[in-house]
Image (cartoon, rainbow, N blue to C red):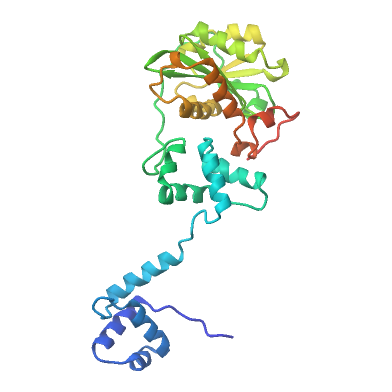
Amino acid sequence: MPKQYNQITADERDKIAVFSAGGFNYSGIARMLGRNRSSIMREILRNSSKQYHVYTSMHADKRSVERKSQANRHERLKNDFIREYVHEKLKEQWTPEVIAGRLDQDHPGFTISHEAIYQYIYKDAPELKKCLPRSRRVRRKRKAAKLNSVNRIPERIGIDLRPQEANDRAQFGHWEADAVVSRQSLASVAVLAERASRLTKLKKIERNNAENFSKAVISRLTTVTPDRRKTITYDNGKENMNHQDINASLGTQSFFCNPYHSWEKGSVEQIVGLVRRYLPKKTDFAKVSDDKIAYIEHQLNSRPRKCLGFKTPYEVFSSTRVALHD
């Protein structure tokens, strides 16, 4: 059995520095430490100061740590094909997680981790940061969103009474609703998200109020077959005051998040974040065309999602049954 090699320790480096300064040669230092002569010679030659040709334990430790760091640093996106794929999909507004998850489906045999893509962007290709959902100068943790005030909703039913099949995403037809608003505009965009498939429906509203919002929801969900419009979950915003009109028109049931718990309709909240990539804050929605809204809707529905096994909302919603994913 070959003898196991033990790396030279910090304590041994202190002794090597003392013995070397005292005039001991490689063989003498090796005998003092019970080491092989070649190990001592390699240590002194590799880690001595290149400027002064002197071995000090502090300098040797620093050079050793740097060398290990370089040895453990793998080249990011070293495959040209993967690099081109990542560049292409980032410019199509795909996130690193979606790119990593979809790569093997589009090109079997090729894999990459989303973390490697993030490192590549922030270390090697900073010009691609603008393609990320939030083009931060440096990576940082997300902050909690500010909470909105609660409004009284007539005939309000809490989310605790929502059917279990809606909670489990085990059935098509359970939707979440929200509105994208701007301080620079009286107009807004109604956003609807189907919980099982994440299918998105968008509608521009000329003025953000309860009457216009209910009309927008009815307009977009009328195109969906009755078996796929069962419930709609709202927050407590004033634009949802006319939810009973929506139920009367579509045959749906309404459920509302707990006060200050808009995250309980997380699917639509996440999609609102994606819409913001196309319509950032301070956008004057009155100047956004219906064609642009339709384009955004199509882009979101043809975008693979990690939660869907990297299938698109179009692909999942067009299937005959819900496939649950972790």
Q: Position of residue 7 (x, y in %)?
A: 43, 78
In the image, taking residue 50 as reference, residue 114 lies left or right, namely: right
Which residue occupies the extreme right position in the image? 320
Q: Residue at x 37, y 67 (%)?
A: 66
In the image, taking residue 66 as reference, residue 103 lies left or right, namely: right
Up-down relation of residue 120 to residue 311 (above or below): below
Up-down relation of residue 30 to residue 241 (above or below): below
Residue 299: name its quadrant: top right
Q: Is residue 105 visible?
A: yes
Residue 304: name its quadrant: top right
Q: Position of residue 230 (x, y in %)?
A: 67, 18
In front: 102, or 233? 102
Q: Position of residue 285 (x, y in %)?
A: 44, 16
Residue 47: name its quadrant: bottom left
In front: 323, or 137? 137
Q: Is residue 113 visible?
A: no
Q: Position of residue 198 (x, y in %)?
A: 61, 28
Q: In the rendered view of the protein, which quadrant contains the N terminus? A: bottom right
Q: In the rendered view of the protein, which quadrant contains the C terminus? A: top right
In the image, taking residue 81 as reference, residue 65 lies left or right, namely: left
Q: Residue at x 52, y 11 (%)?
A: 213
Up-down relation of residue 130 to residue 214 (above or below): below
Up-down relation of residue 274 to residue 245 (above or below): below
Q: Residue at x 28, y 87 (%)?
A: 20
